Image (cartoon, rainbow, N blue to C red):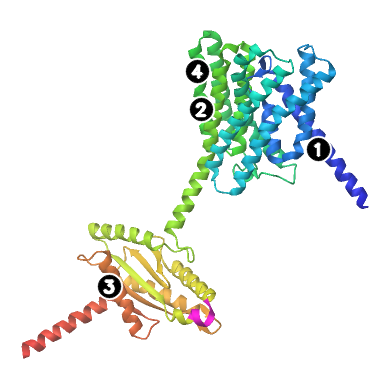
Amino acid sequence: MQDNVMSKAIAFKWLRGITFMVLWLTVWAVAQLMEYTAHASVWFPASGLTYAALLIIGSSAVLPLTFCAVIVTLLTCIQYTLPLNLPQAIQAGILFAGAHIIPYWLSALLFVWIAKLDRLSTPGMIILYIIHSGVASLCTTVLVIYSLVFSNMMPASDISQAWLAFWIGDYAGVLILAPLFAALLSQHFEKKHFILTKYLSPNQTKASPFYFCKIMLVTLLVSFIMLLNQYTQQQESAFVIFLLVLPHMWIACTESALFNMLSLTYSCLLIAIFVNLFGLNEYVLIYQFAIIIVAANALFGIAVPALVADNEKLQAIITTDALTQAASRQHFMQQAERAVKRSLNDEIPLSLIMFDMDNFKTVNDTFGHSAGDKALQSVCQVAQLSLRPTDLLGRFGGDEFVALLPDSTHLEAQQIAQRILTSVNQAEVAPGQPIQCSFGVAQLRQDQNFTELFNAADHALYKAKQQGRNTIVNAESLYAQDLSTKNNNTDEENLV
């Protein structure tokens, strides 16, 4: 039984390996159809598949890739009737395999190692990918060209003319197609060296309703530019292709990474077809560089949602208390200062409620800090339910909370405080141990700033503690008491 399972597993691995080789050879054949000169096409998709395989599968991809390299070398010898016998052609194929695989393999290993350090955000990884793929494709170009010269498959005199177009073609293939091929391989290989979904989310398989319209715009733009170039036969008209960056930035910012890369692939395929169809070989470098620029910009566009998400996370950290999800002290102070200025300028009421848990230290000492944290969360949740959407609840530290109530008088604030107190008393720290809180309420006066309003509410809270806790004290009543005391003292002095 166990031998049968192992046999099936081995057969499955062989089948998967053969399927991969068929895919690589098919991709290579497509590139051959788009060649505008020997050993060079607008882009080389097979490089993208090689890089993706080494990135996702790792060393397991080396043998199938080597086999493919030997096969395509034999086919190239037949295609160009090169003066090489079979052993020489096989030797040239192995040499080509090493030149093609090693730089991409080393680049993939380094890329995976950096990714596992988990120190770079999505934008950082995209920049790294753009640089890595460029350097790796350049190294591959140098090694492959010299391997072709060494194997007598290419004259040394062609190096100066061929290397740049060769490099940009490989670079375009890696930059655009490697993410797509990586997404494809990730679906069929359980053991992955690199988790692509962490950065580009290729599993988002639903396009927006306007995706087809965007693709039609790309089609019309590319067709118009290529026809213009073919009609004018001027270098200046070829540079219009850089306008392609506009629809692709639109796609990058409104579509998932998968459909962004698919649209880039479509554009490159379209350009390659038109170059061959119209014989625009003279301007091919312009189109190749345009492809690289458009692809790099689109990749940065993919990073925009990640940047927004990162900024939102940072904003949440700054403005929100981690334990209770109430506003942080800093954020509350900023909002309160603005609200006070608005209240004084518009002459509308504004009130403040300050409250804390009674005997919070005893709760921590008796039931543990975990119970204390849960009690704080319960108090905060109850308070939020009693407040209006326009109100702001903040945690000032420990068990102390402050609620800002715009457009509210002290009487309305006292009613809200009473609702919070009633609800809080229904919650328990432990069975038979209800949560208790003391409240201080204050309304902003015309001669006050936020600090003075805060101190008034704090003083009212202190009086609530003095009066036996689990109660509410309104600062207005304290003002009235102070005024009454002053009047009595004045009357006594007058009598004396």
> Which percent across, then down, holds residue 234?
51, 10
User: In the picture provided, is 471 more to the left or to the right than 455?
Assistant: right
Please give the residue where the numbered disc 3 appears in the rendered image. Answer: 456
Could you tell me how many numbered marks the image carries? Answer: 4
Q: Quadrant of residue 420?
A: bottom left
Q: Which mark is residue 239?
A: 4
> Which residue type carries mark 2?
Val
> Which residue type carries mark 4?
Phe
Sequence order check: which comes first, mark 2 or mark 4?
4
Magenta-drawn segment: 363-368
> Which residue type carries mark 3?
Ala
Please give the residue where the numbered disc 1 appears in the rendered image. Answer: 16
Question: Which residue is at the far front?
Answer: 150
Query: How far, Cα to Cα, is label 2 from label 1?
Result: 37 Å
User: In the picture provided, is 145 more to the left or to the right than 2?
Assistant: left
Sequence order check: which comes first, mark 1 or mark 3?
1
Q: Is residue 229 above or below residue 249?
A: above
Q: Quadrant of residue 121?
A: top right
Q: Which residue is drawn at 54% across and 74% down?
A: 370
Question: Which residue is at the far bottom?
Answer: 496
> Which percent across, then down, holds residue 114?
60, 44
Query: How far, Cα to Cα, is label 4 from label 3?
Result: 69 Å
The crowding category of the residue bearing disc 1, from other C-alpha atoms within 10 Å (few below 14, some 14 to 19, many at least 20), is: some
Sequence order check: which comes first, mark 2 or mark 1?
1
From where the camera sits, is residue 57 visible? no
Q: Which residue is drawn at 76% across and 17% down?
A: 76
> Which residue type carries mark 1?
Arg
Q: Which of marks 2 and 1 is in front?
A: 1
> Which percent across, then down, holds residue 183?
67, 39
Please give the residue where the numbered disc 2 appears in the rendered image. Answer: 245
Query: How far, Cα to Cα, is label 1 from label 3?
Result: 75 Å
